[in-house]
Amino acid sequence: MKITGELFDRLKIMVQSSPIFPELMDYRDRGLSDQRYRWDCLWAINSHDRNAWFDEVYQFANDDHVDTALRKITGTQ
């Protein structure tokens, strides 16, 4: 996984505090994908914090790396 250390820890805290985070089963019940759930968790985060994180991580990573980190944090496939 390319996103490690402090950046991963910050992402984990942000995603787990997202208002969408507890809704995984609702997403699945509505037929929405795990990937949609992961990214909705990310986009529901405070935009200032999210954009600051993106500014740092996109210097060396891309969406595939972000999705891998989100999979690990959310425990989804």
Image (tube, rainbow, N blue to C red):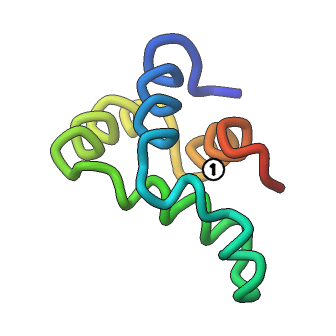
How many callouts does the rendering have? 1
The image shows residue 27 at horizontal and vertical percentages of 67, 75
The answer to whether 33 is drawn above or below residue 74 in the figure is below
Residue beneath the point at 73% across and 37% down: 72
Q: Nearer the viewer, residue 1 or 24?
A: 24
Residue beneath the point at 23% across and 38% down: 49
State the quadrant of the N terminus: top right
Q: Secondary structure at mark 1?
A: helix
Left or right relative to 53: residue 19: right
The answer to whether 54 is drawn above or below residue 28 in the figure is above
Residue beneath the point at 76% across and 87% down: 31
The residue at the far bottom in this view is 30
The residue at the far top in this view is 5
Residue beneath the point at 42% across and 56% down: 19
The residue at the far left in this view is 48
Tell me which amino acid carries mark 1.
Asp
Residue underneath mark 1 = 67
The answer to whether 67 is drawn above or below residue 34 in the figure is above
Toward which corner of the image does residue 36 lie, by quadrant?
bottom right
Left or right relative to 58: residue 8: right
State the quadrant of the C terminus: bottom right
The image shows residue 52 at horizontal and vertical percentages of 22, 36
